[in-house]
Image (spheres, rainbow, N blue to C red):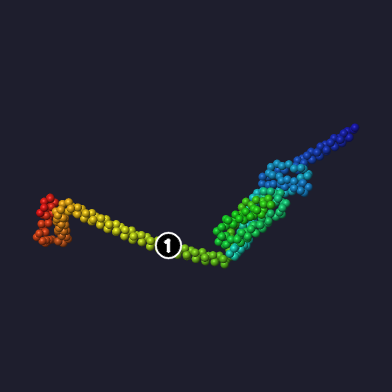
Amino acid sequence: MDKSDLLGQLLGADIVLLLLAVFIIVSIFLGVRIVPQSEKYVVERFGRLQKVLGPGINFIVPFLDRVRHKVSILERQLPTASQDAITKDNVLVQVETSVFYRILEPEKTVYRIRDVDAAIATTVAGIVRAGIGEMDLDEVQSNRQQLIDKIKQQVADAVDDWGIEVTRAEILDVNLDQATREAMLQQLNAERARRAQVTEAEGSKRAVELNADAELYAAEQIAKARRISADAEAYATEVVAKAIKENGIEAAQYQVALKQVEALTAVGVGEGKSTVIVPANALDAFGDAFNMLKGKPS
């Protein structure tokens, strides 16, 4: 074997090794898939679903398996949608909604629905119209959270076959036409006027009640004072009666003489009085009272 044949053999072997190395590198490149945390990969084999690759390092069969869909599993927000609806009391409203969702099973999403955003938006519109059609306008305004929960639950049930989870549903605004707004404004003003009248009437009623309570309290205090005065007079009378019973006529004479002394004293201290004229026997009252006080009858 000459050198040319040997060189040809060596060159052929090197080419084979090189091709083998290239095949191995390509196989590794095609067989190893690193999936980001925020995505999932859908793998097909000969056009059919083979498996779904989760975040991290994954291995597939080179040249047979192929990543057909890279699906983001991050939470998504549908564009704000506006749809008309008619309430139970025949009022036309325009409702603005927004829905948040995320894909849990991408193999269902990519093979069962073409445009998931449009499908969810259509579903939400139908559910909103049906829900508002069962409620009066006042209920729509006051029970918005109840309507939101209902929309979220029904949308979640509708999109479950698509491998989607509805995380939030929001009603951003409920708009009314101009005529309805003016009517509601008039109703609101009338309600405010009624409340003001009720408040004023209640204030007047309360004032009357307080005045009546004050008069009743004053009457009770006067009656109480009179009762106390009457009790005092009755007590004094009882004491006098007891003294007369125990000491006889002398106690009565003493009380009469004491009253005469008090009367003369009151006459003497009157304003503008420089001269006081009294009966001659009036001064005897002082002596009688003094003698009775010492226990000596006159």
Q: Is residue 236 above or below residue 34?
A: below
The residue under the point 70% across, 49% down is: 106
Which element carries disc 1, helix, strand or loop?
helix
Residue linked to disc 1: 202
Q: The N terminus is located in which quarter?
A: top right
Q: In this rendering, would 75 be left or right of 212?
A: right
Query: How many numbered badges does the structure rendering display?
Result: 1
The image shows residue 136 at horizontal and vertical percentages of 57, 62
Residue 130 point in image, percent of width and height: 63, 60
Q: Quadrant of residue 265?
A: bottom left
* Residue at the spot 71% in from the left edge and 54% down from the top edge: 113
Q: Position of residue 31 (x, y in %)?
A: 75, 42
Above or below: residue 230 compared with residue 179: above
Residue at left offset 60%, top offset 61%: 134
251 sits left or right of 70 in the view? left
- Residue in front for this viewpoint, 207 or 6: 207
Mark 1 is on which residue type? Glu
Could you say which is closer to the camera, residue 75 or residue 236? 236
Q: Quadrant of the C terminus?
A: bottom left
Residue 266 locus on image (x, y percent): 16, 58
Q: Residue furthest top?
A: 1
Query: Farthest residue toward the right?
Result: 1
Can residue 258 be seen here? The reply is no
Q: Residue furthest left?
A: 280
98 to the left or right of 228 = right
Residue 19 visible here? yes
Q: Residues within 10 Å of mark 1 (few under 14, many from 20)?
A: few
Q: Nearer the viewer, residue 72 or 195?
A: 195
Q: Residue at x 54, y 65 (%)?
A: 184
